[in-house]
Image (tube, rainbow, N blue to C red):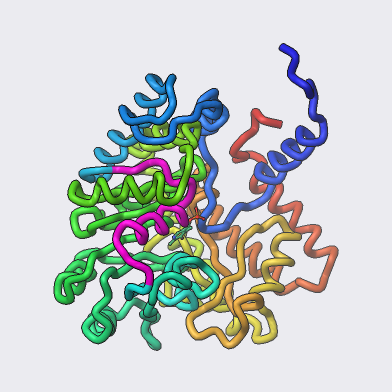
Amino acid sequence: MPWPILNDSETERLTRAEVERQNTALQLIASENFASPAVMAATGSVFTNKYSEGYPGRRYYGGNQIVDQVEDLARQRVCALFGADHANVQPHSGANANMAVYQALLDPGDTVLGLSLDHGGHLTHGSPVNASGMMYNFIGYRVGDSDERLQMDEIADLAAEHRPKLIVAGATAYPRIIEPEPFRKIADEVGALLLFDAAHIAGLIAGGLHPNPVPYSDVVTFTTHKTMRGPRGGCILCTDDLAAAIDKAVFPGQQGGPQEHAIAAKAVAFAEAATDEFRTYAAQVVSNAAALAESLAAEGFRLVSGGTDNHLLLVDLRPFDEDLSGKEAQTVLDEAGITLNRNSIPDDPRSPFVTSGIRIGTPAVTTQGMKEPEMAEIGRLIAATLRNRTDEAAIKGIRNEVRQLCTPLAPYPDLV
Ligand SMILES: *Cc1c(COP(=O)(O)O)cnc(C)c1O
């Protein structure tokens, strides 16, 4: 076939370099994971070629007989996985999913309660630089001063005061279990709808580790690429009575043609998440986070909220080294092959670009087969890197240790 470029060596070289990076360094970004070869094969499939605006059985284009089946498969699998009435698997991302929910449930200017960004909430929970914050009147709730956990009585007071139309539960940097039931109670008390944004923890819920918000929520959104371990994308679950409004808000409200190759890969990921192997995986993600927390605490770091119940840790660097910012820690750790992100801690005195904290997650390293002994090792390597951060030779040595730790457990040994 006369494809114009037979061998794009530049992109190939970059792809190989990225495989090498993922195979030989520690991926500790809490929102990342390694997708299975089956998920990646579906993502790279011919479904990428198809236009299918609309929904199964109601498309604006011809030729969707097979696409309809793949989208129905994804919808059925995810509804079974979470016990949901209805699913929309078309959102291109978690942010799109949230914006569609707002469009379906709210009018511009309506009041919404969500977790403050500087206390662990997401951009789409009302950041002034995000459309959510520009279009809706978001009121932020915060974690407690002493225990750094959600304060349900304060959230109830805020709800009574502001009478939101919608309450958003869920977080992007919160290391504890979020109980959906008390949120439902508060929403009912003030006549609000409840959106549970499970972007980070969907895989932990599917694996039976965290409470399922579906029975308590009007709408649940999540991303498919974080603990869920699927392709990049979003998903919305809702009750039957909201199904039509949600579907209309996704298409034509927010998006045009769905990415059916991603939807095929979501179908694969939902099947994977229903297996015993995935439950074992999710349990190990949580055990690994606890083990890493213990190791870091022993090295002199402070863990926000004192520890973790999920896949992530929020680390306050100040007790370890008052002068060390999150920004500097992220940069030097990256040089050592330890990739994570800086993150504000509650009431951080430094700006969100600098921060006093880092966020560390175990989903990816757990996928590649690391367990408690490796977590102890990772804790030691993080502390050693930060203690020796001005010593170039020491950082080089640690980069080699990281390579030795990762190589036998490389996620994609066959792709090199
Ligand atoms: C990651 C995340 C999102 C957005 O997901 P994207 O796919 O990056 O758009 C939304 N909400 C929360 C709580 C998240 O952590």
Q: Is residue 325 visible?
A: yes
Q: Nearer the viewer, residue 118 or 253?
A: 253
x%, y% of residue 15?
Answer: 72, 37
Q: Residue at x 44, y 51 (%)?
A: 254
Say which quarter of the image contains residue 277. Answer: top left
Q: Nearer the viewer, residue 299 or 142?
A: 142
Image side of residue 56 versus residue 85, left or right: right
In which quadrant is the C terminus drawn?
top right
Q: Residue furthest front?
A: 60
Q: Residue at x 54, y 51 (%)?
A: 32
| Residue 107 included in the magenta stretch of the image | yes
| Residue 290 included in the magenta stretch of the image | no
x%, y% of residue 415?
Answer: 67, 30
**In this figure, what is the number of numbered marks?**
0
Q: Is residue 298 visible?
A: no
Say which quarter of the image contains residue 279. Answer: top left
The image shows residue 5, relative to residue 381, as above or below, that is: above
Q: Residue at x 34, y 43 (%)?
A: 88
Q: Residue furthest top?
A: 1
In which quadrant is the N terminus drawn?
top right
The image shows residue 185, relative to residue 145, as above or below, that is: above
Q: What range is drawn magenta here?
A: 87-108
Q: Residue at x 43, y 77 (%)?
A: 116
Q: Nearer the viewer, residue 32 or 222?
A: 222
x%, y% of residue 298?
Answer: 53, 73
Q: Residue furthest right?
A: 393
x%, y% of residue 23?
Answer: 66, 42
The image shows residue 212, relative to residue 385, as above or below, that is: above
